[in-house]
Amino acid sequence: MNLSYDIDLTSKVLADKLTIYQRKNLTDEQRFYLEEKTDKWVLEKKLYYEKPAKERELERQRQLELERQKQKYIDDNAQIFKIIWDDIFFGKDKIKFEIKRYNVLKTVPYQGVFEALNTIKKEYFLRLLGNNAFTIAFFKGEVLFEKSPGWKKIIDTIEKAKEIYELKYLNLKLPTKIKRFNYLSNEEIIALFEKSFSKSPYLKFLASKQSQAYRIITINEYLNHHTEESFIFRLVTNKGNNLIIWGNVNLARATHIFISLKNEKKKTLDLVEEFICRPDIDTKRSLLYYADSGSKKIKEDLNYLKPIKHTSLFEYEIEIENLLNNI
């Protein structure tokens, strides 16, 4: 059996480990095997430490050399593949590689992956990422993670895909749905909603001013018994405050602006999101125009600044720039 001479595990530690094994539902045969292995390990360790220091060092060096030779053999015989998304399939808590030219690759366990991710391969992995290839090394069908620079890129992309799946396929019955992204970059969010941004030069302008310290937030906005796509942008002013800007893909909908001061950025954003999602108010945008006492109270709580109508892109840009320079 392999010994790790760099770690001095005592018989007490091994006994503790054995106690843990015994708590599991093991058969008598399995328990006997573990006890035998543990006793053998303790004996080998005892004999090892009874040897002179020089002999122990030689033995340690021999063990290290064997490990180096084993690693060299693995490195020399590793197979390097350029993996594309057509080669990758998802199962429950596992990632499968099915390469036509090499079909005996072993499944890789990965917590949190689910089979439904296969449903967005075309619309996300292939449409947004194209035929990007990832370098993965295999030895006897198993992934060599330390020799696979593409592995981390694959995992990062999967985390982004999970966000997209959650946005598009989960909680579909909610009339208003807000999605904050943690993994997708702003550029990837814009690419994902390319059709919406191509319809509105106002959204494009806001996206160009979006602070890279934050992510664009998407909203399925419920209006008059149907939903429309809208977005929350966060722009940092010259004084370090945030403009929280709520824009809709429909050019007939005005942009609504809230101000978030340095010490209450998260609080204001949470309040704005909560307001947008309120099921008891169907005409939220109209309410922001009202001047009655109830509307004033809501706008004060939200730090509401003003609406800007989409009458002229040039005037719109000037007004946003003025707010950024003076607030």
Image (spheres, rainbow, N blue to C red):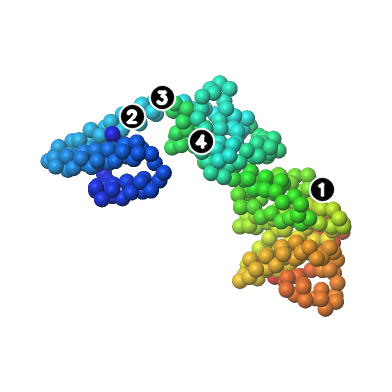
In primary-sequence order, the first of circles 3 and 1 is 3
Query: The residue tagged with tag 1: helix, strand or loop?
Result: helix
Give the alpha-carbon distance from disc 2 to disc 1, as whole Å: 59 Å
Residue at 58% across, 22% down: 100
In primary-sequence order, the first of circles 1 and 4 is 4
When the figure is inspected, residue 45 is found, relative to residue 294, above or below; the finding is above
Marks 4,2: beta carbons within 8 A: no
Residue at which label 4 appears: 108
Residue at which label 2 appears: 70
Residue 253 on image: x %, y %: 84, 58
**Residue 138 visible in this rendered orientation of the protein:** no
Give the alpha-carbon distance from disc 2 to disc 3, as whole Å: 11 Å
**Looking at the picture, which amino acid does disc 4 mark?**
Val
Query: The residue tagged with tag 3: helix, strand or loop?
Result: helix
Q: Which mark is residue 135?
A: none
In the picture provided, is 290 more to the left or to the right than 51?
Answer: right
In primary-sequence order, the first of circles 2 and 1 is 2
Residue 213 on image: x %, y %: 61, 57
In primary-sequence order, the first of circles 4 and 2 is 2
Residue at which label 3 appears: 77
Residue at which label 1 appears: 199
Within 10 Å of the Cα at label 1, are there few (<14), some (14-19), or many (20+) other Cα atoms? few
Give the alpha-carbon distance from disc 3 to disc 4, as whole Å: 20 Å
Query: The residue tagged with tag 4: helix, strand or loop?
Result: strand
Residue 324 on image: x %, y %: 70, 65
**Looking at the picture, which amino acid does disc 2 mark?**
Lys
Residue at 28% across, 38% down: 37
Give the alpha-carbon distance from disc 4 to disc 2, as whole Å: 22 Å
Residue 272 on image: x %, y %: 72, 65
